[in-house]
Image (tube, rainbow, N blue to C red):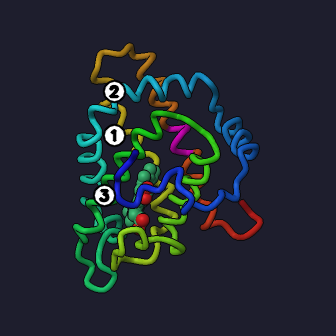
Amino acid sequence: MNTIPGYTHGTPSVSRSPVSLTDFEQMKASVLFGEEDVKFLRMSHDIVKGRVEAILDVWYGFVGSQPHLLASFSGKTDGKPLGDYLTPVRKRFGQWILDTSSARYDQAWLDYQHEIGLRHHRVKKNKTDGAPSTDLVPFRNLFALIFPVTFTLRPFLAEQGHSAEDVEKMYAAWVKSCLLQVTLWAHPYVKDGDF
Ligand code: HEM
């Protein structure tokens, strides 16, 4: 059983995604995501599972180096970074690396995607950790982070001797998976009826 605080994937506290598995199949087709991508995400699992902390160091370093990003992890009134917020979120982020590379897309996964979207949006941001932080991760940052997250992952995918072609395919599968996930997370940000 998973004991990461606030990681509620597969539990009854997660509400049903407004996006259906059929919709998600169409989204996959839209981004050219197929069985080959599942295969290469799972290939990447064996690489990333032993490198989670090093990957998180790079990603947290990136967010921490940009004040407008760090603001989402900082006190709403004093603007100071909140260690008690950054640390538990980092643990769930680590689990997300493993989940993304496991590439198992069932209803529980879809529902947790919606939960992650709500946690970036004002509906649920701060609630899981009781953090006194800003109300919302601005969508403009959420979407744009797809590039640095995937681009900085690439050297990790290449460090264990896989062929250049396999590295390229793992990288492409990660880009597509992040595009799909952040699109799902966008649901609370999009006007009713427009998703
Ligand atoms: C939470 C991933 C963009 C700020 C999380 C979590 C993950 C994640 C996996 C934990 C979800 C959980 O609770 O299980 C990502 C990815 C992004 C992205 C893959 C882009 C591709 C951003 C950006 C910011 C941000 C741009 C703003 C700097 C946060 C915050 C939380 C969080 C503040 C905690 C939300 C809460 O209060 O529960 N993110 N994120 N994220 N992320 Fe992101």
Disc 3 marks a residue whose amino acid type is: Val
What residue lies at 40% left-to-right and 45% top-to-bottom?
1
Label 3 sits on a secondary structure element that is: helix
Disc 1 marks a residue whose amino acid type is: Thr
Label 2 sits on a secondary structure element that is: helix
Above or below for 103 versus 2: above
Dominant SS type (magenta): helix
Estimate the x, y position of residue 110 in percent, counting from the top left.
61, 49
Estimate the x, y position of residue 188 in percent, counting from the top left.
61, 66
For marks 2 and 1, the one nearer the N-term is 2
Estimate the x, y position of residue 69 in percent, counting from the top left.
35, 64
Label 1 sits on a secondary structure element that is: helix
Between the residue at mark 2 and the residue at mark 1, the CA separation in whole angstroms equals: 14 Å
> In this image, 130 relative to 124: left or right?
left
Any magenta on residue 45? no
For marks 1 and 3, the one nearer the N-term is 3
Whether label 1 touches label 3, CB < 8 Å: no
Residue 145 makes an appearance in the image: no
Estimate the x, y position of residue 194 in percent, counting from the top left.
74, 63
In the picture, the disc for residue 152 is: 1
- Find the magenta span and give its range: 175-179
What residue lies at 73% left-to-right and 50% top-to-bottom?
20
Ligand 1 lies in quarter: bottom left
Foreground mark, 2 or 3? Answer: 2
Mark 3 and ligand 1: say if the CB distance to the nearest ligand atom is below 8 Å. Answer: yes
Whether label 2 touches label 1, CB < 8 Å: no
Q: What residue would you read off at disc 2?
A: 47
